[in-house]
Every structure is written in structure tokens, then in C-alpha cells.
Amino acid sequence: MKIIAYSYTDPLLEVASDETNWGWEIDQVYQDLGKRTQLQQLFTDCQTEAAAYLLIRRLEELGDSVEQVSDRLNQLETMGVMVIVTEQPYTSENAHLRVELLNLLHQIQRQQRSRRISQGHARNRLETAPPPGKAPYGYRRGKGKYTIDRSTSPVVKDFFDNFLLYGSLRGAVRYLAKKYGKKISVTTGRRWLTNPVYRGDTAYQNDEIISNTHIPIISREEAAQVDRILRRNSRLPPRTASANRSLAGLVVCAECQSHLRVTRVTQRHQDKEYLYLRSISCPQNPKCRAIAYQEVLEQTIETVCRDLPLAVAGMNFPQLDAIKNSLGDAIARQQEILSALPALTETGILDLETAKLRAYKLHTEISALQAKLATLPPVNLRSVAQAVSIRQFWLDLSETERRFYFREFIRQIEIIRQGKEWKLQVIFIF
């Protein structure tokens, strides 16, 4: 009793299946990738030596239309081959139940229509054409790619510039509404900041990204800085990223492990205000005392000026350089393979469709490696640390500017209480 199996894979939409994963002892497996040459071989072999059973995953693998599927089922039935479908409720034994088969063929027809649409989208991906749908704000659809919309792209660029300057998403959203009358939600603003399109890349529904497909609105360096700010802000309590005070969201009480909120105290008929840091949810009884904001700020600046160069000096820069070099070498290797594809196509080693599939895969791998490279710290961290370890540098900044730089280097500031006295410990992000 001969048992055979057949599988068809469309390389545009899926990866070839594991031919050993049938759950039966198979005498021979016929497997097609893109074209159904092995299916024709299966019919030829069955005419020479009949098979008892044929296993397939889905009936639509037998053809590109309902007519082809139905015709090939009839051929197999005529040859006495029992068809067993592993992922659909059908076997040749109950093929006389034509109502069930008819419903299944209608289902196949709908699925094949959906597959044809998906195949069209997949071919567009191979040509690095934009996915279906409206172009992101700041762009419009051109001939097979996104093109800059000169009327709206300055709005997007100004949004990014404001975020890079102040590190506040909500602040950038408010700035856009005030200057341009362009009202967007905070969620939309976050999507703008992470959208690969504004970086010159095209992202598809399968989360694969192709780099350098069109003119970007922000540079690679700006994009890397945006990502660093977003990661930094994600560690802070909600709504503190856009707070006015530079220490907001950074200070924690080591005694009660509560974050400290900046509170403002004024006196009646006086313009002067007093700022304090007070625990948000202190479980102690009595509760931890509030601390003057200015005193914590001054001690933070002194600690940063003293300890930041030492912390940077302790980083393993040779190891960091090795990681960067390794990523750079991997990108160069992929680009070499990419540049060799036209020659392989001309000599007939690769057909055009296979070459396009390989090029698409290489482009996505290069984009992933470039994304890893962008997340690494800048190489000039030592020189930056020396520049910001000067006390006057911090004193000359506004609170908003100081907030940006604090969060660039500081993960957390712990207040360590000693009776009525206290001291602080600055924990850097590296």
C-alpha cells in the first residue's frame, strides 16, 4: 500500500513546509515551490504505479482555481487514489456527499481570491512599492514610492525638531496645535515618532522594513536620537516627560521607594513661590518630609559634574567598538551579496523572481542590522561627558533644557534620609 504526500508553497506568501511533518509513514513526498511541476510528476507516477493514499494540507494546493482543483480531484478519483486533506474536513471516502464538497469549493474560491490579492501586495513588496492605503501625513503617493508633500512635510519636520529639542511628546503635540493649528492626539504623535516612513524606510504588514526607499523627513542621526529619547521617557512615571521642572520623574525616596513630585507653595499677596519635592504615596507614619527642590537640584549638578566622567571612563569602549564593527561587517557582507544578484540573473543561475525574493530578504536583514547599530550609544560619549561636567554648563541652561540633558544621562536620583538630614545618589543610565 503506497502512501504519497504533496505540498505546494507560494514563495511570495509563505515558507516551505516541513515535508516530514505529516503524521504518517510516507513513501514519497512531492513538493512544489511556486510552480506545480512536481504535481504533474505525481500524476505521471500514479499512472505507472498506483498509490493508495494521497495526503495534502488543503485542497487549494491542487490548483489556482476551483476548476483546476475539481478537475485534479476527479483525475485522482479515477485513478483510485484516496485523497486525505489534513487541514480541511474532506476525504475521498465521503466525496459522494457533494453538498459538503460544494461548500468546500466555494470556500476555496474565496480563499484563492484573497490569495491573489495577497500575491499582488507581495509583488509590490518585491518592487519596494508602498503598501496599500493612504500615505502618511507629510507624504503623497508618487510613481511606485512615497514623495515629499511640500505643503505638509514642514509641519512634520517641525514636530520632530521640537521633540528633539525638548524631549516631550505632549509638548511637541501642543506646539503643533499652537503654531500650525494642526491638532493631533498624543497617540498619533507617538506613531509619527516611530513611523519608519519619516526615516526614508517602508514598513509592511508583516513587520518587515526596507531601508532607503524614498526621501526621508528626518536623518538617521535624528531618528536614533528620537529612539533614545523614547526609551528614556518610557522609564519615567506617566506625564513627567513634559513636566516643566528638570528633576520631575527622576527623584525617588530610598526610605519609602516612592517617587517625589514637584509641588509649588505660594504665600498670599506675594509673587514669590517655593518649590518642594514631596513623596507621592509614602506609606511611612509619619510621612517622609518634603525637601527643598533647589537644594536637590544643586546637589544633583555637583554630583553629575563629579561622577559622570568617572562613570563614562568605566565603560568598556573596546567591547562597544567590537559590537559596532561586527554589525558593520555583517551589513557589508549582505550588501556584497546584494550587488552580486544582477550578475547571477544575467548568467541564468537565478531567475528574475527568485532574485527579487533574495534581494527583498537581504534588504530586510540589512535594515534590521542598521536598526541594531542605531541603538548603540554615540562614539563621542567621553567628550560629551567632559563637556557636561562643568558646573557653569548646567547653570546656564533653562529648566527645560536641563530636563533634556538630565534624562540623557540619569536613570534615577535616590534620596537617602539620615534622620532630618539627607544625601542623594545619582544612578546613571550606563
Image: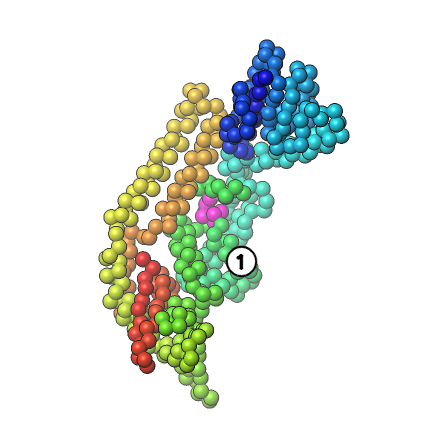
**Residue 107 at what x, y percent from top left?**
69, 33
Furthest residue in direction front, as rendered? 1
Asked if residue 226 is among those painted magenta in the image, a careful observer would answer no
Quadrant in which the C terminus is drawn: bottom left
Tally the marks. Answer: 1
Examine the structure image and report whether residue 197 is included in the region drawn in magenta: yes
Q: Is residue 331 above or below residue 49?
A: below
Task: Tell me what residue is drawn at x 42 percent, y 42 percent.
Answer: 367
Residue 195 position in % (x across, y down): 49, 50
Residue at the image point whose x is 61% and y is 30% from the top: 86
Q: Quadrant of the N terminus?
A: top right
Residue nearer the viewer, 10 or 328:
10
Give the residues in magenta: 196-201
Relative depth, front residue between 357 and 43: 43
Q: Amino acid at mark 1?
A: Thr
Secondary structure under tag 1 reads: helix
Which one is nearer the viewer's eye here, 251 or 177? 251
